[in-house]
Image (cartoon, grey):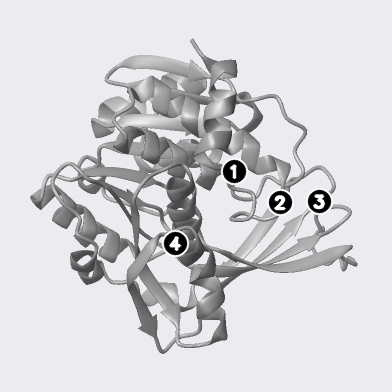
Amino acid sequence: MITVFGSLNVDYVFQVPALPAPGETLLATNMVVLPGGKGGNQALAAARAGATVHMAGAVGNDGLGHIAIAGLLADGVNTEAVALSERPTGTASIKVDRDGENAIVVFAGANADASHARLTHTGLEKGDLLLLQMEIPVGEMAQAIGYANEISAKIIWNLAPMQSVEIELLRQVTVLVVNEIELVQLGLHLGLPKSGGTVSLLSNVAQQTGNSVVLTLGAKGCLADHHGDQIAIPALPVSPIDTVGAGDAFCGAFAAALDAGEPFSTALRWGCVAGSLACLKTGAQTALPSREEIAAHLPALSA
């Protein structure tokens, strides 16, 4: 079973000819309102990949709160650990250009009230997976990590968006997931040298934290340092329509595969396939692939 403790948002997605420069006003060609938030996205991605998923977090006691959890409920995610807050539901303004690249601004809203105490409502047990991101207060995530370790649950932490975190906390996690920007930020935070390139930095981060570290590389797939072994997995070749949520699709499917008992390298393939397929539709949650879709494309990435 997977418990996701993280953000729940409503996304306002604007299709634009190009991402706006500072001071520039653009006319969008389309706009949709969709459920989102990295926590919600990853919970739904894991559920669609076949996992039993519980979601813990907070939404506002407003109309947007219903939108934020509607997709989760439709796909069988248990939301009993989602609390109601007096703050408005978190929102995100997402601009997507004609090449599928994006720029995102997030308002935390009710996510600031997400409490680790809600984890007791999820049934998280020994051997289960706790999946975290960084769109809720770091202090609450630290408490959640402590609780998960007390009951011997495994922890996957997607350090997005990157915030300052004590190395002692990072060392309590099973797997860290970062993108290229977050890897550099993490390296700087840990005082690691930038010389030597990406592979060297990834290895150094893994050695410093004692974790398995997964680096997502977008169209190039992913690279992982797992117990000192370097594993490279390509992405599926696709023509992206919208890259929003691709990283969340990776994290959710990767977690679902590990939860199902798949080997680490196979779980990485699940993540790469899901991340690639998520680029073929508009929106984060609406684009997340099913377990059957992932399985159909796995042979293309077989070792």
Marks 1/3: CA–CA distance:
15 Å
Q: Residue at x 58, y 47 (%)?
A: 288
Marks 2/3: CA–CA distance:
6 Å
Confirm or deny contact between disc 4 and disc 1 (CB under 8 A).
no
Label 3 sits on what residue type? Asp
Residue toward you, 118 or 24: 118
Say what secondary structure mark 4 lies in.
loop
Rendering coords of residue 157 (x, y %): 35, 46
**Residue 62 vertical position relative to residue 221 in the rendered view, above or below:** below
The first of marks 4 and 1 along the sequence is 4
User: Quadrant location of residue 58?
Assistant: bottom left
Q: Residue at x 59, y 55 (%)?
A: 285
Q: Which residue is mark 2?
A: 102
Rendering coords of residue 297 (x, y %): 59, 25
Q: Which residue is mark 4?
A: 135
Q: Which residue is mark 3?
A: 97
Residue toward you, 147 or 164: 147
User: Quadrant location of residue 21?
Assistant: bottom right
Marks 1/2: CA–CA distance:
11 Å
Confirm or deny contact between disc 1 and disc 3 (CB under 8 A).
no
| Dot label at residue 246 | 1
Confirm or deny contact between disc 3 and disc 4 (CB under 8 A).
no
The first of marks 1 and 2 along the sequence is 2
The first of marks 2 and 3 along the sequence is 3
The first of marks 1 and 3 along the sequence is 3
**Residue 248 vertical position relative to residue 239 in the rendered view, above or below:** below
Label 2 sits on what residue type? Asn
Confirm or deny contact between disc 4 and disc 2 (CB under 8 A).
no
Say what secondary structure mark 2 lies in.
strand
